[in-house]
Each structure stands twice: as structure tokens, then as C-alpha cells.
Image (cartoon, rainbow, N blue to C red):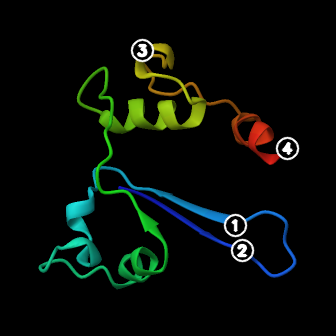
Amino acid sequence: MVLFSSCLVIGANKPNILFIFADDQSYETIGALGNKEIRTSNLDRLVNMETAFTNTYNMGAWNGAVCVASRNMLNTGRFVGRAHAKKTGSIQTPDMPARILRPSLD
């Protein structure tokens, strides 16, 4: 499941963004989005305050570990076939957070 939550802070030029990326979770597992059996009070509050995506698509994976492909697509912004993850499952490097955030902070 992916949730984006943004709110303007008084005096700030840019919004704060909260991005929750959960492995193997879909919108049907959130109480505020229709699930009557699972209690998700904190996620329900976020959904009720901001935006929730209920019709998203995960491109897939190279094997049964969908999270590896998903994480690499998210971290690189590349299509699954171009993310070039190695069999170890990660293309992340120590400077990955800085490389990901740099373009969006300008």
C-alpha cells in the first residue's frame, strides 16, 4: 500500500510529505478504505486526513520476491526491466538517499 500525506507547515515554502511503502499490503487491508475486520486506527487517521491511492499497480518482479523489484523501482524511478537489480536483490549504495532526494529538493 502506498499513502502520500502532505500538509503545509506555517511559514514553510514546501509541503511535508509522508510516504509509507509497506510490503504486501493493499488498500483492502485498511479499515478506512472498507475493511471491517482489520483494525488500522493510525492508518485510518492518515487516510481520513489526506490522500490514499486505491487503484495502483505494481509492475511485478523477477521472481517471487515482489518487494525487491518494487523497492528498486521506487528507489531509482526506473521501470522494472531497467532497474538492473542484481541477484542479491539490491542496487542500493550508501549514497542512495542523497541521490534520490537531490532532484526533488530543488
Mark closer to the observer (1, 2)? 2
Residue 34 vs residue 46: left or right? Answer: left
Tell me, for residue 16, which label it has, or none. Answer: 1
Crowding near the residue tagged with mark 3, few <14, some 14–19, many ≥20 C-alpha atoms within 10 Å: few
Does label 3 or label 1 sit earlier along the sequence?
1
What distance separates the C-alpha of mark 1 from that of mark 2?
Answer: 6 Å
Mark 1 vs mark 2: which is more N-terminal?
2
At a point 76% along the width and 78% down the height, the residue shown is 9
Q: Marks 4/2: CA distance? A: 18 Å
Regarding mark 1 in the picture, which secondary structure is present there?
A: strand
For mark 3, give the secondary structure: helix
Q: Residues within 10 Å of mark 1 (few under 14, many from 20)?
A: few
Cβ atoms at labels 4 and 2 below 8 Å apart? no
As measured in the structure, the alpha-carbon distance from the residue carrying label 3 to the one carrying label 4 is: 28 Å
SS category of the residue bearing label 4: loop
Q: Secondary structure at mark 2?
A: loop
Please report whichever mark, 4 or 1, sits nearer to the chain's N-terminal start. Answer: 1
Please tell me which residue lies in front, 22 or 44: 44
Residue 86, position as x, y percentages in the image: 48, 16
Question: Is 106 displayed left or right of 71 in the figure?
Answer: right
Q: Amino acid at mark 3?
A: Gly
